[in-house]
Image (cartoon, grey):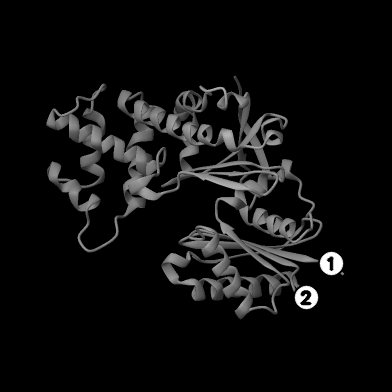
Amino acid sequence: MTSYYAGCEGGASHSTLVLINEEGRIVAEVEGEGTNQWLIGVEECCRRIHALIADGKNIGGVDTKLAAIGLSLSGADGDEMCEEITESFMLSYSEVSDTCFTCNDSFSPLYTATNTGGVVLIAGTGSNCLLVNPSGSSVNCGGWGHILGDEGSAYWVVLQTLKTIYQHNDGFVLSPHSTKYLKKAMFEYFKLKDMFGILQYLYPPSQQIDKEHIAKFCVHAIVPGAVQGDALSLHVLRSAGRELGKHVKALVPKIEPDVLRAPGGLKIVCTGSLWKSWTYLKDGFVEGITPQTDEEKQLNQFSLVQLKPEAKAAVGAAAWAAKKSGKNINIDYDVMSRIFFTHKF
């Protein structure tokens, strides 16, 4: 009898679930609401996932119990929270699957691109970096949010730009490049009447900061500025690349040798919208990741990998769950991803 596996890539605003068989063929794909437990609670998170699975089984004509479910969810932070989600799901919906495993949403892109370990580097509104070794151990660098972290993200790029403009305007720290273009763009995007207007976005009264709106200033003005040759725009994007490279370098001492010796060197799976501006991140990234200490010099080559448009990170969640349950799904990783940059030291 054919075994089926489910993989869910769950975000704050929407989620994708796939059902695949042991040959790696997707038999159903469904999308639904967000499944971040910090926003909706664990019980509602599990209810929504169960509804997605029911829809998927109906579409795929699957009427048997699943062999395993992999939940790669935004908000599944730390072992304790992952265990709580798994236990809650299996307690409420034990008839759905033999086993269930939960991990953070950083895991699924890596398992969609490779089954031999590597690094996931997220650079979107926020940033995060995760190492997964072949032994199963994982180590995180970054991902601490807009107050403690997010270095190299679109939000971070915008914040550095705003600080540069405001400090230059005060005469506190003079910008190395003209702020004229980005200051004008800032007034237009945020609809400011004066310099004090930005405070309502950064310190909103009685509500959460809108990180996404702030981060979109990067796409609205900073990236177009770099395209036009604006020196400050180019400077902050190069700085972002440097910060992203530093994330990976920090993990090098914890990477198992087989991952470093793989063909093409260390595989770094890049996700998030900021990677669309790789041209302007590249020099800074290479600078940031370049080994300095003897321990870091174990890294002598790396390859940056992106999932292809047709690839689904939810497939990686299903493959991860299968592996955790002692099975290997036959996935053609060359179909799922492509290498877009390789560098040797």
Q: Is residue 97 left or right of residue 163?
A: right
Q: Which residue shows up at 51% across the image and 34% down it?
A: 250
Give the residue number, with chain letter if any, for mark 1. Answer: 2
Q: Nearer the viewer, residue 328 or 338?
A: 328
Query: In the rendered image of this protein, does residue 316 appear above or below residue 118?
Result: below
Query: In the rendered image of this protein, does residue 265 appear above or below residue 155?
Result: above
Give percent across and percent down for residue 208: 29, 59
Give percent across and percent down for residue 296: 56, 27
Query: In the rendered image of this protein, does residue 103 appear above or below residue 276?
Result: below
Q: Which mark is residue 64?
A: 2
Identify residue type, mark 2. Thr
- Where's the C terminus, which quadrant? top right
Quarter location, residue 222: top left
Identify residue type, mark 1. Thr
Disc 1 on helix, strand or loop?
loop
Q: Nearer the viewer, residue 122 or 51?
A: 122
- Where's the N terminus, which quadrant? bottom right
Q: Which residue shows up at 67% across the image and 78% down it?
A: 94
